[in-house]
Amino acid sequence: MYSETGAPPGLANGQLAPCPNKPNCVSSESSPSDDHSIAALPITPGMGEEPLLKVKEVIELLGGDVNFSNDQYMASTFTSDLFGFVDDVEFRIDQGSGLLHVRSASRVGYSDLDANRKRVEQIRVLLSTN
């Protein structure tokens, strides 16, 4: 299926790639006045020495797969049960600000009925309670 192919866009000039001009993407590195904007996740002491390990636990708990990870960046995917649509969810550590930047986007289609925004907020809640 077409939506299963491809890869996350990765980093562009040290930041998460910008969202395309479609409503099926959110990013904490978008301008606050942009419809794609979502708040970054705070890095908390509860995340331990390697915050992305905690993020990995949450991604897997929610049914996602981590496809790539290093000490500063993680790429994961979520696949819908019904049609096999793939959403890329990426994280970038910003040590200077103590934030974990996030980008969540559908690979295909136009609207996602806020699925990516809801997923990031669900990740936010799980990271703050675990």
Image: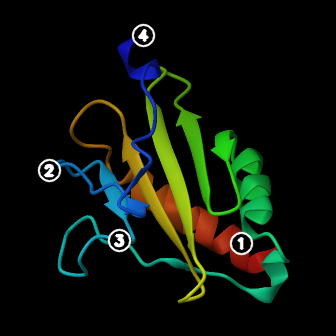
Amino acid type, residue under disc 1 in the picture? Leu
- Which three-letter amino acid code belongs to the residue tagged 3? Glu
Q: Outermost residue, top direction?
A: 1
Side of 87 relative to 50 (left or right): left
Quadrant of the image for the N terminus? top left
User: Which residue position holds label 1?
Assistant: 127
Q: Is residue 64 visible?
A: no
Question: What amino acid does circle 2 point to?
Answer: Asn
Instruction: Give the SS element for disc 4.
Output: loop
Residue beneath the point at 39% across and 42% down:
9
Residue 2: % across, % down: 36, 14
Question: From mark 4 to mark 2, how far is it between C-alphas?
Answer: 23 Å
Residue sitting nearer the eye, 5 or 129: 5
Q: Residue 21, which numbered label?
A: 2
Pick whichever, 18 or 95, lies toward us: 95
Mark 4–mark 1 Cα distance, whole angstroms, equals 32 Å
Is 73 located above or below residue 93 in the figure? above
